[in-house]
Amino acid sequence: MVCIEITPNIYWNGLNDRTSDLFEGIWPITKEGVSYNSYIINDEKVALIDLVKGIKTDDFLSQIEEVVDPTKVDYVIINHMEPDHTGMIKTMRKVAPNVIFVGSERTKQMLEKFYQLDTNFKIVKLVIVLNLGLMF
């Protein structure tokens, strides 16, 4: 799949997964498949909003390359910790060693436990503004 420009500098770069048998390890999806929705913001800073399941890493990185060099990603915004959104966190850290992960305090705790990631994390509180035009 190719990235789809939503508006200048914002792209949908999700993927379709037709290889997984179950969604959330519970619901059969062999006929329908599932989509992993992710977005790229390519502005003063580069941010990815959500990632994809680990088995889709190569496809995902190829899509990012359509817009920006993956090594130049500044932020990965983590909306929630399910593996279909976080499965390539360690890979992203290797590709972009200075990337800053952004999420809640609970997300930070889960990253430490699940992925042994305890550095380069920005905790979002009630209101925080990144140089992306996003407000949390």
Image (cartoon, helix red, strand yellow):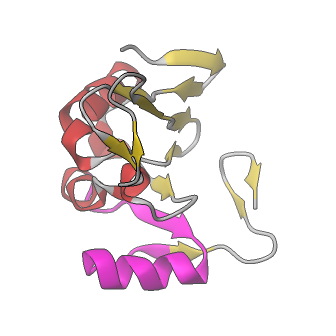
Query: Looking at the figure, which quarter contains the C terminus?
Result: bottom right
Q: Is residue 106 magenta?
A: yes
Quarter occupied by residue 33: top left
Q: Is residue 108 magenta?
A: yes
Query: Looking at the figure, which quarter contains the N terminus?
Result: top left
**In the picture provided, is 80 more to the left or to the right than 20?**
right
Quarter occupied by residue 101: bottom left
Q: Is residue 108 above or below residue 17?
A: below
Q: Is residue 58 above or below residue 66?
A: below
Question: Residue 66's spot in the image, x, y percent?
Answer: 35, 19
Q: Is residue 7 above or below residue 117?
A: above
**In the picture provided, is 134 more to the left or to the right than 104?**
right
Please say whether residue 117 is visible from this viewpoint: no
**In the picture provided, is 124 more to the left or to the right than 2?**
right
**In the picture provided, is 123 more to the left or to the right than 127?**
left
**26 or 72: nearer the eye?**
26
Residue at 60% across, 25% down: 9
Magenta residues, start to end: 96-121
Residue at 34% across, 44% down: 22
Question: Residue 105's spot in the image, x, y percent?
Answer: 58, 83
Q: How many labels sit on residues?
A: 0
Question: Residue 119's spot in the image, x, y percent?
Answer: 35, 80
Quarter occupied by residue 110: bottom left
Residue at 26% across, 60% down: 93
Please say whether residue 9 is visible from this viewpoint: yes
Residue at 52% across, 59% down: 78
